[in-house]
Image (cartoon, rainbow, N blue to C red):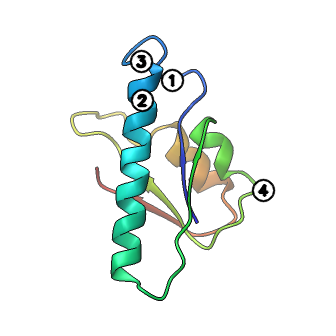
């Protein structure tokens, strides 16, 4: 199950909710297609949640691997809130990938 979280308060004042949802669905659908193509025997389910991503990495997370995007290019602050929450609270292995 691929899960992508789009924060409830995100996008309404920046790119617009419709645009943010379209982009989130695009990213999630592309990931699901690629995963299914590379693993034909795997059943792939994609879910888009309206939640803050850091809320998904707590003790109730039921997954074998949590994959999170690393720091954005040009930022020197290190890991963001979601990655730090995952490293501190996820009950499964965490993979931080470059953006």
Disc with the residue nearer the chain's start (4 vs 1):
1
- Nearer mark to the viewer, of 4 and 3: 3
Q: As displayed, is residue 50 above or below residue 84? A: above
Residue 66 placement, left or right of 89: left
Residue 40 visible in this rendered orientation of the protein = yes
Q: CA distance from mark 4 to mark 3?
A: 30 Å
**Residue linked to disc 1:** 10
Q: Residue furthest top?
A: 13
SS at circle 3: loop
Q: As displayed, is residue 13 above or below residue 78? A: above
Q: CA distance from mark 3 to mark 2?
A: 6 Å
- Residues 68 and 30: in front is 30
Label 3 close to label 2 by CB (< 8 Å):
yes
Label 1 close to label 2 by CB (< 8 Å):
yes
Picture coordinates of residue 12 (x, y %)? 49, 15
Packing grade of label 4 (10 A; few <14, some 14-19, many >=20) is few
Which corner quadrant of the image does residue 75 belong to? top left
Question: In the rendering, which numbered label is found on residue 50?
Answer: none
**Residue linked to disc 4:** 60
Residue 69 visible in this rendered orientation of the protein = no
**Residue linked to disc 3:** 16
Packing grade of label 3 (10 A; few <14, some 14-19, many >=20) is few
Disc with the residue nearer the chain's start (4 vs 3):
3
Disc with the residue nearer the chain's start (1 vs 2):
1
Disc with the residue nearer the chain's start (3 vs 1):
1
Picture coordinates of residue 65 (x, y %)? 56, 69
Packing grade of label 1 (10 A; few <14, some 14-19, many >=20) is some
Picture coordinates of residue 64 (x, y %)? 61, 73
SS at circle 2: helix
**Residue linked to disc 2:** 20
Q: CA distance from mark 4 to mark 1?
A: 23 Å
């Amino acid at each position: 199950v691929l899960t992508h979280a789009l924060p409830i308060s995100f996008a309404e004042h920046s790119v617009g909710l419709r645009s943010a949802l379209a982009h989130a669905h695009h990213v999630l659908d592309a990931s699901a297609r690629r995963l299914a193509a590379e693993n034909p025997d795997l059943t792939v389910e994609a879910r888009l949640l309206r939640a803050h991503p850091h809320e998904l990495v707590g003790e109730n997370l039921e997954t074998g691997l949590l994959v999170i995007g690393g720091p954005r290019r040009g930022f020197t602050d290190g890991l963001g809130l979601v990655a730090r929450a995952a490293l501190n609270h996820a009950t499964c292995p965490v993979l931080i990938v470059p953006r």
